[in-house]
Image (cartoon, rainbow, N blue to C red):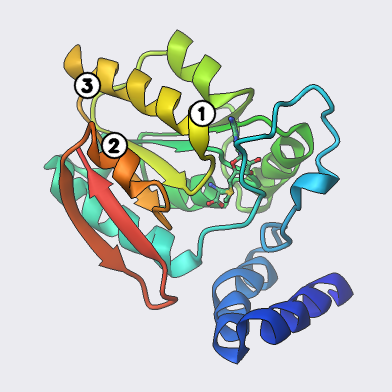
Amino acid sequence: MLILLKSLWAIATEKGIKQAWYELRENIMYDVVNGTDTARWLPLDDYTDNELDMTTAIRYQATHTCTIKDVLSVIPRMLRVPVADVTLLDLGSGKGKVLCEAYRHGLRDCIGIEFNSDLCAIAQSNFRAVNANVFDRVRVHQGDCILYLRDTAIADNTIVFMYNPFTGSTMTEVLAILFMRKFKGSKFIIAYVNPEQADEVEKLFTPLGSTVSSGGQITNFYH
Ligand SMILES: C[S@@+](CC[C@H](N)C(=O)[O-])C[C@H]1O[C@@H](n2cnc3c(N)ncnc32)[C@H](O)[C@@H]1O
């Protein structure tokens, strides 16, 4: 709790009271209500897996609760299928908050890819905290998104979710693989929160619209 208060104070001084209020309402309260550990950021300097190439990685930070709810509510309409037929693939899934909420929303399958082993372990304990059945509809794969996507098909009616997970060559390669999958007929939509690399995405995918959640996070949708 003390760590969270310290980080709230740091956000208030660095980014202002409004951002600190959003952090409290959208991230810290989520953990208070659910008994999870998602709100604490993990700076890249604290990543302990030495073999990881982190030149393109963005540190762990959770998507706001209201942004996740917004994405989950618009996607079935965009894919034109019931929620129970939708899969969510979170590229850079961190502590699994998006997967927990997708599970509770009733999605068919909720899959996370995360290369940091500490975050994967925390995600597993968060699944237990929200009573998500780990061996059934929700799981996290420890590994690099590029390797996962190269080896694994994307199920039809998938949300490829990204909360600004990486930049540079990783983003370029991930987008190239996704584009190949689309070319071969996979039916999926990209939901890209805090879309700092939107220009890159728009070279290969068609924008479907955008939402701004009540916590101020922007999500772009593409197919
Ligand atoms: C901004 S966080 C988003 C966390 C989560 N999606 C959420 O919204 O709560 C980005 C995550 O991507 C992970 N990441 C970055 N590059 C990665 C890569 N190449 N493969 C797998 N995970 C990666 C980071 O470790 C971090 O946990």
Distance from the alpha carbon under mark 3 to that under mark 2 = 16 Å
On residue 125, the disc is: none
Identify the residue position indicated by label 3 in the image.
182
Tell me the kind of residue under disc 3: Lys
- Is residue 185 visible from the viewing direction of this image? no
Does label 1 or label 2 sit earlier along the sequence?
2
Does label 1 or label 3 sit earlier along the sequence?
1
Q: Is 171 left, or right, of 153 in this rendering? A: right
Instruction: Report helix, strand or loop for mark 2.
Output: loop
Instruction: Report helix, strand or loop for mark 1.
Output: helix
Does label 3 or label 2 sit earlier along the sequence?
2
- Residue 47 lies, in percent from the top left, at 81, 40
- Residue 95 lies, in percent from the top left, at 65, 47
Identify the residue position indicated by label 1 in the image.
170
Tell me the kind of residue under disc 2: Val
Seen in the picture, residue 72 relative to 182 is either above or below; the reply is below
- Residue 194 lies, in percent from the top left, at 43, 58
Seen in the picture, residue 66 relative to 184 is either above or below; the reply is below
Identity of the residue drawn at 84% across and 74% down: 1
